[in-house]
Image: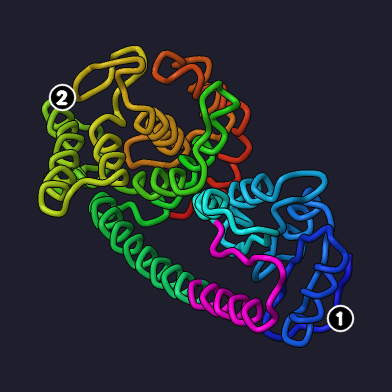
Amino acid sequence: MRETTFDKLGKIVLVEDESTVGSLICSILETHFDVSWLTEGLSVLPLVQEFGADLILLDIGLPDISGFEVCKLLKADPATQTIPIIFVTGHSDPNEETLGLRLGAVDFVTKPIRADMLLMRVKSHIELKKHRDDLRSIIDEKTHALGHAYRGVITSMAILAECRDEETGKHVQRAKNYVRVLAENLHLGGYDSFAGLELELLTESAVLHDVGKIGIRDSILEKPHRLTAEEFEAMKKHTLLGRDAIAKTEQLFGTSTFLRCARDIAEFHHERWDGTGYPHGIGGTEIPLCARIMALADVYDALTMPRSYKRKYSHDQAVHMMTLESPGHFDPQLLNVFRHKANAFQVIHAKYQTL
């Protein structure tokens, strides 16, 4: 590998096994760019993954692997797929050019190498890459800012629903963090774990689980004693009120994964695995997975926090009650996850326990 020790307009990786061609290309580019020269295609991916590159000049006819195959590897890796690739070839073949462009290359350079043409093309493609990177950075920044504001509005709505029965945003924070712990560790129970955007959407939608409480009378929400049977029936309606509110939002602004998940959680998070929950009395896998996750998180929080009409239970007591005394209430596979991650619940509870 041949490498310069300075960085100018960008970093180029040259993959060329012919020494005369490689030396010529380096001499043309090294005045303006930091050039790393490799002679084998299989060396490219690890080098670029570790050190990065602004552009790759890739010979098609390499001794160990076709340049086309190297291109496929680079485009399949998220860390390298946006790096522009210019193929270097000994002859002009329309079929090869079509294949290369389909694989994601941006240009072709034909031997014998013309210094002015090579330099112009390399500069142009590196400039284009930098413009794309700058634009992507701006979009990411704006998306992050918008997402932050959006999450703020959602959390405010959830707190508004909660605060009417003397709860605060602490409950919202506990609930979403319990849900996150379960969702990202579902593999411990035999499910596929949530990750990335899917995990974030589930976590954020969880804060709306009790948004329907906005439609419940203060006399019920603020009652210092146990509810009567009639009052409890009225309280149950918060699941349907929450569902309807989110459904109306979907009608007005269009649906999304976030809103569908939030709607399912609001409607079904008081259903039980054994079918004894509400509002519909459904059970098992009829209950959406996101709601089954929320149900477990919500019950743990209810048990471990004090209410005017009941004392709070310790973490160990809550775990015992949920796993041994009332296991039929919950998805058995989720209970396995809960058993494995119970300590994480205890940490979250300690962090957000002040109401």
Quarter the C terminus occupies: bottom left
- Residue 13 can be seen, yes or no: yes
Which residue bears the numbered disc 2?
229
Range of magenta residues: 105-132
Residue shown at the point (60%, 59%) measured from the top left = 92
Tell me which corner region of the image, top left, top right, bottom left or bottom right, holds residue 7: bottom right
Q: Assign a secondary structure to mark 1.
A: loop
Which residue bears the numbered disc 1?
5
Tell me which corner region of the image, top left, top right, bottom left or bottom right, holds residue 261: top left
* Vertical position of residue 283 compared to residue 192: above or below: above
> Which amino acid type corresponds to the residue marked 2 in the rendered image?
Ala
Residue shown at the point (49%, 24%) measured from the top left = 334
* Vertical position of residue 167 compared to residue 287: above or below: below
Give whichever of 18, 238 is nearer the camera: 18
Principal SS element in the magenta part? helix
- Residue 218 can be seen, yes or no: no
> Which amino acid type corresponds to the residue marked 1 in the rendered image?
Thr
Q: Earlier in the sequence, mark 2 or mark 1?
A: 1
